[in-house]
Image (cartoon, rainbow, N blue to C red):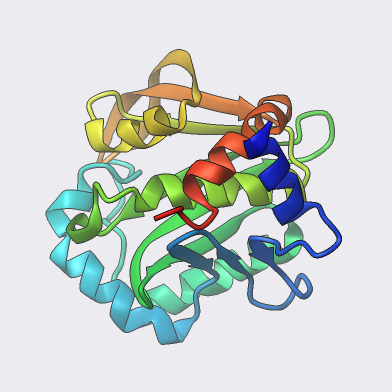
Amino acid sequence: MCAARAYLQRYVGEDSFMVTTRSNIYSPISLHGRRVVLRTMTESDYEGWLDVRERCHDWLLKWEPRSAHSSHLAEDQRSFVSRCAIRERERQMGTGYGFGIFFEGRFVGEITLSSIQRGPLQSAYIGYWIDEAVAGRGLMPEAVVTMLQYAFESLRLHRIEINIIPRNAASRRVVEKLGLRFEGIAERYLEIDGAWEDHARYAITAEEWNDRAPELVTDWLLPSAD
């Protein structure tokens, strides 16, 4: 009850402070967690993004979606700006939201809410990656909870999935820390670095979020008691 009361006072009360801030659909979006900020990216973020991509090349490449017949993610500035523009168009159409993850003012990764389906489904997928230098510090679970709150409370989606290669232990620890429901293994689900890979499927619904939001927000988003 204490966690639920704190959640309601923080996010629903008359003097509430929302974790998510958004002026209108065409303005940049910033979502604030306890330590991380999720922000839509622009050309000015390129240098920070490139630094992480170059340092973490081997750490990231083996987990990224890529057809056997396509090249790896282009890292030149023009391609980065083009991807930012694509993300902006997706946001305007309501089909996807892409954010940079910032910690202590520095870019440390990305998180996306993609393939948004409305109508009877009301669903989407979360994907993420993080700088190896800050992995294991709880930043990604915090970013995921921040994104879940936005997906369920602002976008009013009903179901969110996160799909992970079973041997990607670091990525699975994120969803396991959050206690997301495991739904099984989807065989040869997605082409990763040129090979069709099985994926472990995790999901959470709006009903589950409503039940667990006080716990998740208290554990990952509210200021710590320390």
State which quarter of the image contains the C terminus. Answer: bottom left
Q: Position of residue 31 (x, y in %)?
A: 59, 64
Can you name the residue that lies furthest to the bottom here? 44
Image point 46% across, 26% down: which residue? 179
State which quarter of the image contains the N terminus. Answer: top right
Image point 84% across, 35% down: which residue? 119
Q: Position of residue 81 (x, y in %)?
A: 46, 78
Q: Position of residue 113 (x, y in %)?
A: 57, 49
Residue 154 placement, left or right of 214: right
Quarter of image, res 186: top left
Is residue 114 positioned above or below 1 on the image?
A: below
Residues 192 and 202: in front is: 202
Can you name the residue that lies furthest to the top here? 184
Is residue 90 positioned above or below 49 on the image?
A: above
Q: Is residue 15 visible?
A: yes
Image point 86% across, 61% down: which residue? 14
Q: Is residue 113 visible?
A: no
Q: Position of residue 103 (x, y in %)?
A: 37, 68
Image point 64% across, 47% down: which residue? 149
Residue 92 placement, left or right of 189: right
Residue 119 placement, left or right of 211: right
Residue 210 placement, left or right of 31: right
